[in-house]
Image (cartoon, rainbow, N blue to C red):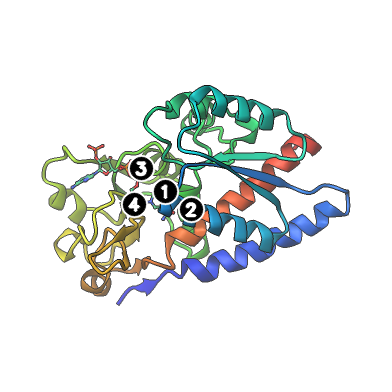
Amino acid sequence: MGTIINGKDLAEKLQHDIAKEVKELEKTALRPGLVVLLVGDNSASQTYVKNKQLAAQRIGIHSKVMRYPETISETELLEEITFFNQADEYHGILVQLPLPKHIDEEKVLLAIDPIKDVDGFHPMNLGRLFAGVPHTIPCTPYGIMKMFEAYDISLSGKRALIIGRSNIVGKPMAHLMLAEDATVTIAHSKTVNLHELAREADILIVAIGQGHFVTSDFIKPGAVVIDVGMNRNEEGKLIGDVNFDEVKSLTSFITPVPRGVGPMTITMLMQQTVEACRRQKLGE
Ligand code: NDP
């Protein structure tokens, strides 16, 4: 059976290291600050924001959640972002997605000063990543790279298949793995022969948002399987895109859901807030 990659434990260890770094920064009178902008009352978004706030508190990052009604206009939200772009005590700005339909997500992401874009979704930061000169990196793929590092999983020369091509997971994941010399394929809903492609993959990353989509017939024996998916089943239980119980015996490494990729995403957000603070205040 494959080794279960314990994202929760790894996240705790990394958060401990980040907290130490924050303490060191405090000696120079610097305190990293993160502001989260939350529009409306989407329950999943509320939970994500709460978890981010708790992590920030544990680490010693100064954090604030700004809550806006669902009816806030695009102009008003853009004005808020402009305000926080100039607010000295916040080094990171995060707009929790999704936004209500009347607000253009692209415009909002573009409005965030790239140096404060700790989510790494601004086209400038995505462009830097794709050009091989990254600053801020989308937190989920970044967290997965940290997992590879912690578990000594080498990517060089490996065949990787990423299922899902979003700007926040699939595409940045591909570039990060490419930079570590993996041979990367990205699949999506129009890909034909997905099973065959998957069975050739030494490393399989699944980020599609469909509970238990990946079954044993997708797996090359000995593959590393990373499950990004977060779905609720009929009983309201959190499940991944991979049928963990069915495939785990075929893998060399596998992430569970929960306690896999999720805690790493939040951790990388914290790390990038500290890095943003250093960049803005110390010119690093
Ligand atoms: P998106 O909905 O933006 O993208 C989903 C991708 O999956 C699309 O590229 C889509 O293809 C592809 N896809 C959907 N169905 C299939 C299929 N049957 N076969 C092949 N490809 C398919 O999702 P996100 O990237 O934002 O998120 C993916 C999942 O990861 C979700 O469950 C989300 O909740 C979770 N997530 C978890 C995080 C964490 O921290 N653990 C962080 C971010 C996301 P096409 O482009 O053709 O439509």
> Which residue is depicted at the point 75% across and 35% down?
280
Q: Do the residues bearing badges 4 and 2 touch, measured as CB atoms within 8 Å?
A: no
Circle nearer the viewer, 4 or 1 = 1
Left or right, residue 282 beside residue 251: right
According to the picture, the residue beneath numbered tag 4 turns out to be 158
Tell me the SS state at disc 1.
loop
According to the picture, the residue beneath numbered tag 3 turns out to be 170
**Quick check: 243 above or below 25?**
below
Ranked by sequence position, the earlier of labels 3 and 4 is 4
* Label 3 lies in ligand 1 vicinity (Cβ under 8 Å): yes
**Quick check: 84 above or below 238?**
above
Residue 54, image quadrant: bottom right
Left or right, residue 239 beside residue 18: left
Residue 266, image quadrant: bottom right
What amino acid does circle 2 point to? Answer: Gln
According to the picture, the residue beneath numbered tag 2 turns out to be 46
What amino acid does circle 4 point to? Answer: Lys
Q: Nearer the viewer, residue 185 or 115?
A: 115
What amino acid does circle 3 point to? Answer: Gly
Which quarter of the rendering shows the C terminus?
Answer: top right
Circle nearer the viewer, 4 or 2 = 2
> Which residue is depicted at the point 21% across and 61% down?
219
What amino acid does circle 1 point to? Answer: Asn
Circle nearer the viewer, 3 or 2 = 2
Residue 42: which numbered mark, if any? Answer: 1
Ranked by sequence position, the earlier of labels 4 and 1 is 1
**How far apart, in angstroms, are the residues tagged by discs 4 and 2?**
38 Å
**How far apart, in angstroms, are the residues tagged by discs 3 and 4?**
17 Å
**How far apart, in angstroms, are the residues tagged by discs 4 and 1?**
39 Å
